[in-house]
Amino acid sequence: MGLSRGYPWGLALAGVLVALALLLPYRSVSFPRADGVSVRVPPLDRCNHTSDLWDYLQLGRALSRGEGFTSSFTYVPFLPESVPDPAESGLRPPVHRFPLFWRQPGYPVLVGAAFTLGGGSDPNALVALQALAVVLLPLATYLLARRFLSPGWAALAGLWALLSPVALGARAPLVATTWFALILVITVAAALD
């Protein structure tokens, strides 16, 4: 099993190019809040308001700040009963943090680590995290496939993984799918050892 004929380097280069094309449009932008403070957010014209991205960003931010696996906002059906309804009370409710039970912790922990290493909660850390997964997925797939296939077929498997819209999350690339695919490939490779 070698790294013959430059296939891994070609897959790495292809991964970098795909990551750039896929993720550069999702770089964070400055957004002025009502209180006059400007914050960095993903581009609002590219991210659906119901995207899982918002939960991942909120959970990663809370974890990097040491607030645990909690959130201060959610989708309406998931609001805890302890949050007062502003329509009934006429008051703006205070910010309540509550645990999020409908998200698995793995990806938010990665996001929180990226925020901690990046020195803040800029969403560009999430874009960089996704770019890493996009580059590593075809390489890991190639190395796994090389155990069973010739270098050419293994390279095709890596290319297939790179171009898979499901693994890349092409419609919403800032979610856990790519990392899940990468961890699955690494787990299978480890199980075969």
Image: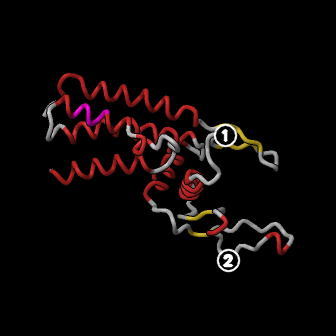
Q: Residue furthest right?
A: 90
Query: Which of the 4 image quarters holds residue 15?
Result: top left
Across and down, in percent, residue 41 comes to 65, 43
Crowding at mark 2 (Cα within 10 Å: few <14, some 14-19, many 20+):
few
Marks 1/2: CA–CA distance: 32 Å
Span colored in magenta: 154-159
Secondary structure mostly seen in the magenta stretch: helix
Q: Residue furthest top?
A: 5
Count of numbered marks:
2
Element type where label 1 sits in the image:
loop
Residue beneath the point at 14% across and 41% down: 148
Lower sequence index among marks 1 and 2: 1
Residue beneath the point at 21% across and 48% down: 189
Residue beneath the point at 62% across and 48% down: 48
Q: Is residue 128 above or below residue 191?
A: above
Q: Is residue 22 above or below residue 172?
A: above
Where is mark 1, residue-wise? 45
Query: Mark 1, mark 2: which one is toward the viewer?
Result: 1
Does residue 157 belong to the magenta stretch? yes
Amino acid of disc 1: Asp
Where is mark 2, residue-wise? 81
> Is 66 displayed left or right of 82 in the figure?
left
Residue beneath the point at 19% across and 28% down: 152
> Is 190 displayed left or right of 139 in the figure?
left
Amino acid of disc 2: Glu
Query: Which of the 4 image quarters holds residue 74?
Result: bottom right
Does residue 132 belong to the magenta stretch? no
Across and down, in percent, residue 51 comes to 58, 52
Element type where label 2 sits in the image:
loop
